[in-house]
Amino acid sequence: MAKVISIVNQKGGVGKTTTSINLAAALGKEGKKTLLIDLDPQGNASNGLGLNTNDFEKDIYDVITNSCKIKEAIIKTKFKNLSIIPATINLAGVDVEFVKKMLEDNSFKQNEQLKESIEEIKDTYDYIIIDCQPSLGISTMNALVASNSVIIPVQCEYYALEGIGQLLNSVILVQNKMNPELRIEGVLLTMLDGRTNIGLEIIEEVRKYFKSKVFNTIIPRLVRLVEAPSHGKPICYYDPTSRATLAYENLAKEVISRNGD
C-alpha cells in the first residue's frame, strides 16, 4: 500500500512545489513507483514536469468532484517510475463548490473526497506525494485527511516559522477529528544561502523547536534548481551533477528510511 505524503505549508514561497516535484522524481529513481498529485490550482507541479493543459483532458478537479475515476486522470511521465495527476485553474473554485454541496446534502463529506479516490489506487504505488496550495482551505484539508504524513518545508530565511503554529493546529485538528493516523513525516529546511548568517540561525532555531522531526538534508538555494521547472524537468534530470540533485536524492533516502522501506 502506498504511503501518502502531503507537502504542506500555508505560507507561500517556501519550496513546496519544488520539493514535491524533486522528491517524487528522486523516489522514482530510487526504484519506488511514485504518483505526484498536483493540488494547487496554479498547476506549477504539472508545468514543472513539462505538461500543459493541451496534454490532458482530466485533472484533479475532475477526480475530487467525482466527474471521473482517479485512474482516468493519471498521466505517466517520461521520468522513471513517476506519474502525475495534473491540476488546472478549475481547482480554484472547489472550496465554494464543496460548501454548496454540503449545504444541499448533509451527508456530503467535503474533506474526504480525495481520500476516497486515492483508496482505489493505493496498491498501485509505493509513494503518493501531494503538492498542496499555500492555504488551509478545503483542498488542503482533503490532502491531510488522505495522507499518512506531512512534510513541512521551512525556508532558511527571516520569518521562517511564521504561521507554523496555525499549520500544526490544523494537523492536530485532522488527527483528532478525521485522520488519527496522520503524523509529521518531517520538517525540511529549504532555500539555504550558506553565505548568510541568518540561514544558519534559522537552522538552529528550527532544530531546537522540532528536534528529531527535522530532516538531516537541507535544500540549498541554487539557480539551477530555479531553472529546472522552466525546462519541464526535475533537477535530477536537468542537472544530474547539481548539489540540489544530491540533496533531493538524500531526502528521498531519508523518507524511505523513515518509512522502513
Image (cartoon, grey):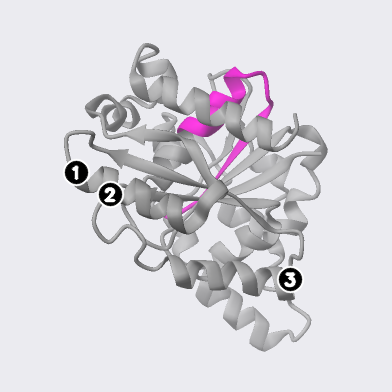
Mark 2, secondary structure of its residue: helix
Answer above or below: position of 11 versus 33: below
Dot 3 or dot 2, earlier in sequence: 3
Q: What amino acid is found at the position of numbered circle 2 in the picture?
A: Glu
Depth check: give the residue in front, 32 or 117.
32
Q: What amino acid is found at the position of numbered circle 3 in the picture?
A: Met
Which of the 4 quarters of the picture holds residue 236? top left
Depth check: give the residue in front, 260 or 228.
260
Q: What amino acid is found at the position of numbered circle 1 in the picture?
A: Asn
Q: Which numbered tag is attached to residue 197? A: 1
- Tell me the quadrant of the picture where the N terminus can be found: top right
Compared across the picture, whether 21 is left or right of 76 comes to left
Query: Disc 3 versus disc 2: distance between alpha carbons?
Result: 36 Å
Mark 1, secondary structure of its residue: helix
Compared across the picture, whether 27 is left or right of 107 comes to left
Dot 1 and dot 2 residues touching (CB under 8 Å): yes
Residue position marked by numbered label 3 in the rendering: 178
Dot 3 or dot 1, earlier in sequence: 3
Which of the 4 quarters of the picture holds residue 15? top left
- Tell me the quadrant of the picture where the C terminus can be found: top right
Query: Disc 3 versus disc 1: distance between alpha carbons?
Result: 41 Å
Place of residue 11 in the rendered image (x, y in percent of width and height, measured from the top left): 36, 61
Q: Nearer the viewer, mark 3 or mark 1?
A: 1
Place of residue 113 in the rendered image (x, y in percent of width and height, measured from the top left): 70, 63
Q: Which numbered tag is attached to residue 25? A: none
Please provide the residue range marked out in magenta.
Answer: 22-41
Instruction: For residue 33, say whether it is visible.
Output: yes
**Residue shown at 52% from the left, 33% from the top:** 23
Q: Is 194 within the magenta?
A: no
Answer above or below: position of 231 versus 12: above
**Residue shown at 52% from the left, 72% from the top:** 95
Q: Which numbered tag is attached to residue 201? A: 2
